[in-house]
Amino acid sequence: MSEANIKQRCSELKGRIEVLKKECDTLFGKLSVYIYKNEIDRCYECIGSLQKNFMDSYDMMEEILEIHTSYIDRLEYRIEQLELDRVRQINSVKFLGTYRDWISIFITEVTNRLEKGDWKLVKTSLVRLSKNLLLTEKQTECLKELEIKLKEIGMSLYDIELLRQMKDQNNTQFHSNDQSFDEVKLLLHAPIPDEMNQYKPPLQKALDALDKWDINLLPTGNDAFIFPIRNQKMKATDLP
């Protein structure tokens, strides 16, 4: 029932209760006369009418109470949802700001482990691959090596793409790098907007890898990384 319908129904019930109150006043007046005249049958009729009016009034009051209770419950639920949304938005800002540096750390550590290319070559190769352009032998070998490195830690090229998307979403005014590694891992369990939950699995994998590699210092001078992968199923092993 909408808010307008609730108000309309309550107004109707209150109007009917007012009518019953006036009828009761009239019946009490008649009852007094009948008692004075000792007209027992008419007294019983008035008492029966009064009883019916009282029961109808109680029923309508009960309906009004149920309507108000239901409306209050709905309001409380909406308030709880708004509060949850507020918490999620706050956590979203903290989530993006906190993981910006750690994503950069991870990407740097992965590319530093490549023997057949650096990040510049990886980026160029992925751009060409996403546009269905032919790759050189060097580019193909670089992507295959990257995929092998990622598989060692349970990740894929698509996971890297999700991390890149998340990094790009972050507004620099929310940039934060004062959380410890343990605090960063705990933040993964905080409620965030549903559309951001897709970033948690690759983040977890990246943090597990960093923990395994024992990385404790933030890198300096990180460049912005662009990863224009469009297809989740894209694999370096599918290259010609």
Image: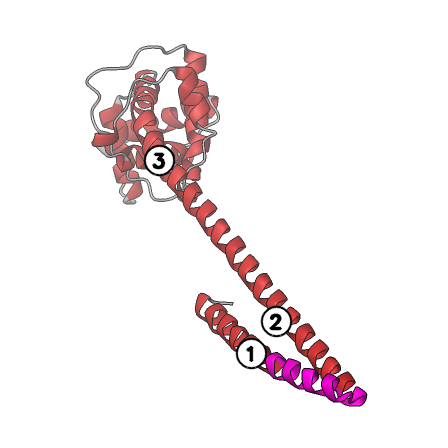
The mark that comes first in sequence, 2 or 3, is: 2
Specify whether residue 14 is in view. yes
Q: Nearer the viewer, residue 16 or 141?
A: 16
For badge 3, the amino acid type reads: Ile
Q: Residue 16: which numbered mark, if any?
A: 1
> Of helix, strand and loop, which mostly describes the magenta segment?
helix
Image depth: mark 2 or mark 3 in front: 2
Q: Which secondary structure lies at badge 1?
A: helix
Residue, x 52% and y 73% (percent of image)? Answer: 14
Q: Nearer the viewer, residue 61 or 213?
A: 61
Q: Position of residue 147 (x, y in %)?
A: 40, 28
Specify whether residue 238 is in view. no
Q: Quadrant of residue 117?
A: top left
Q: Nearer the viewer, residue 194 or 117?
A: 194
Stretch of the chain drawn in magenta? 24-42
State which quarter of the image contains the C terminus: top left
